[in-house]
Image (spheres, rainbow, N blue to C red):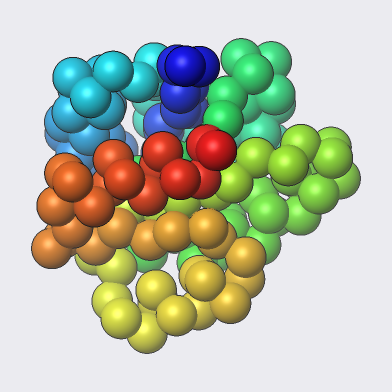
Amino acid sequence: MKRIKILIGTMGMDQHEVGALSVSRMLMDAGMEVVYVGRFNTPKKMVVAGIEEGVDVIGISCHSWEYLHFMPELLDLVKQYNANIPIVVGGSVITPKDETQLIEMGVAAVFGSGSTKAEMVEALRALAG
């Protein structure tokens, strides 16, 4: 069985990384490989890093509302690079309205503050195929 590889980071000026680090550890404990790119990334940096690392999924951790600003560019870059990498978004500030908007934009999955470890791991395994 192929080991699932996930890139995780934050974009823009969002400097909160406790959630991203916690999720990264949780995914590693579930047997996944995590490439953590840290804070202050641009959409292009996230996509290029995902391609270079050969990841199965790109995870964006959000604790500010910048994800609504950056997501269209990130999704467009995935298409421009023909990357075919699913994008997931997680964070404590995601409202139900924002979740709907993100899914409509093309985000593969959204994990808000009530998401469980089992839900996240199952969804990521399904997305990684």
| The residue positioned farthest toward the bottom in the image shown | 97
List x then y, in percent, for residue 65. 37, 64
- Is 43 on the left-hand or right-hand side of 81? left
> Residue 97, located in which quarter of the rendered image?
bottom left
**Depth check: 59 or 72 in front?**
59
Q: Which residue is drawn at the image coordinates 57% and 24% (left, top)?
A: 55
Q: Is residue 100 visible?
A: yes
Q: Which residue is drawn at the image coordinates 73% and 42% (left, top)?
A: 84
Q: Which residue is drawn at the image coordinates 50% and 78% (left, top)?
A: 101
- Is 121 on the left-hand or right-hand side of 12? left
Q: Is residue 62 visible?
A: no
> Residue 33, located in which quarter of the rendered image?
top left
**Depth check: 77 or 127 in front?**
127
Q: Is residue 8 above or below residue 118?
A: above
Q: Is residue 77 above or below residue 55?
A: below
| The residue positioned farthest toward the front in the image shown | 1
List x then y, in percent, for residue 116. 14, 52
Q: Which residue is drawn at the image coordinates 28% and 40% (left, top)?
A: 121
**Depth check: 18 or 96 in front?**
96
> Residue 8, located in which quarter of the rendered image?
top left
